[in-house]
Amino acid sequence: MREPPISPIPLTRLAPSPTGALHLGNAFSFLINWAIARKLSWNIILRIEDLDVSRVHEGMIEDCLNTLKWLGIDWDGQPILQSSDMNRFHTGMQALAKARRVYPCDLSHKQIQEALNAPQLGDQPDAAGYEAIRPDPIPDRFDNPETSWRFIPDDNPIRFHDHNMGPQAFSKTDLGEDFIVWTKRQAPSYQLAVVIDDHASGINRVVRGRDLIDSTPRQLMLYRALGFTPEPEYTHLPLILSPDGRRLAKRDLDTHIGSYSALGGPERVIGLIAHWVGITPEPTPMSTSEFLDTFDPHTLPKNDIVFREEDAQWLRS
Ligand code: GLU
């Protein structure tokens, strides 16, 4: 496959999925990713993850760009649309097939769990169980893009050092069943698309929410199976939770950035994020450039943060 451009300086990416309006949790991750990059003189690109065509509707990409600009976030070069070239994903799948690491499988998660627990396979899902699901022999060509394909994970645990969350280790059991790399929609799964695109752009720093930390071992396995180097360095950020302890979702209306941008400038949203990262003891309106001046990329919060009722009121006051 094509070698990535040599990137002598660190290069990161903002990778929004324009499948709904951006919320405060997205704003938090993107602002921190951007501020780390600007403080440490990394380059930063914007990649719009628009492969799930059933969920990306007209106007959503533009909304997403406008929200980032409203927050005062900028990036280097033109935004990249993930859907703009599908050939590279087919090439990646061919390489994985040649290495006999992928196989076609139209079983659902439930059917796999049932097959793994079938009496003739023993009570525990084990190597023999997985082998009963995988075809024998494993094909060496990616020739059936109409069905899902799964990846055969490494036997050894995957370890990496997270710059915020510390040392991480994931065993094969932690990762569960063989994960999907190609979907029935004839498109790569999130795991494969991220790896192919990060490598193609020469990304060597990834900063994102900790909800994706267990994607990292899967992505590192794909890097290794595809022979891609260098592997990125990872920083996972805490999540923003709603008052009842759930992770914020795009359906939580009070947290949509659009509902605040309609009220005026970003100073209150930025001020709340500044409070969350410990810059101020209480939320205080702040411009994006003041935030950048006072932000310390070496002292990031590790624990999840609760978006309180009073925060919602303060944002609207
Ligand atoms: N597009 C993903 C999201 O919005 C982020 C992908 C990534 O950072 O690896 O959650």
Image (spheres, rainbow, N blue to C red):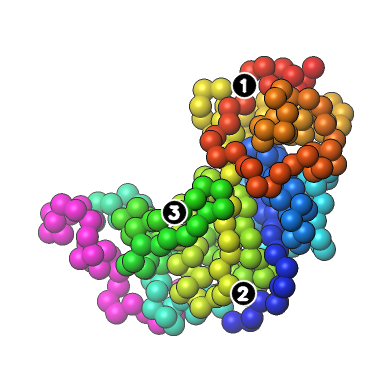
Helix, strand or loop: magenta stretch = loop
* Residue 142 belongs to the span the image colors magenta: yes
Mark 1 residue element: loop
| Closer to the camera in the image, 77 or 184 | 77
Which label's residue is closer to the chain start, 2 or 3?
A: 2
Residue at 62% in and 57% down: 206
Look at label 2 and name its amino acid.
Arg
Nearest to viewer (mark 2 / mark 1): 1
Report which residue position mark 3 lands on.
Answer: 168
Boundaries of the magenta span: 116-144
Which label's residue is closer to the chain start, 2 or 1?
A: 2
Nearest to viewer (mark 1 / mark 3): 3
- Name the quadrant of the C terminus: top right
Residue at 67% in and 33% down: 278
Q: Is residue 2 above or below residue 305?
A: below
Report which residue position mark 2 lands on.
Answer: 88
Q: How far from the left and from the top, in percent, is residue 219?
A: 50, 63
Look at label 3 and name its amino acid.
Gln
Q: How far from the left and from the top, in percent, is residue 302?
A: 55, 40
Residue at 61% in and 49% down: 208
**Can residue 300 be seen by looking at this rendering?**
yes
Report which residue position mark 1 lands on.
Answer: 308
| Closer to the camera in the image, 176 or 166 | 166
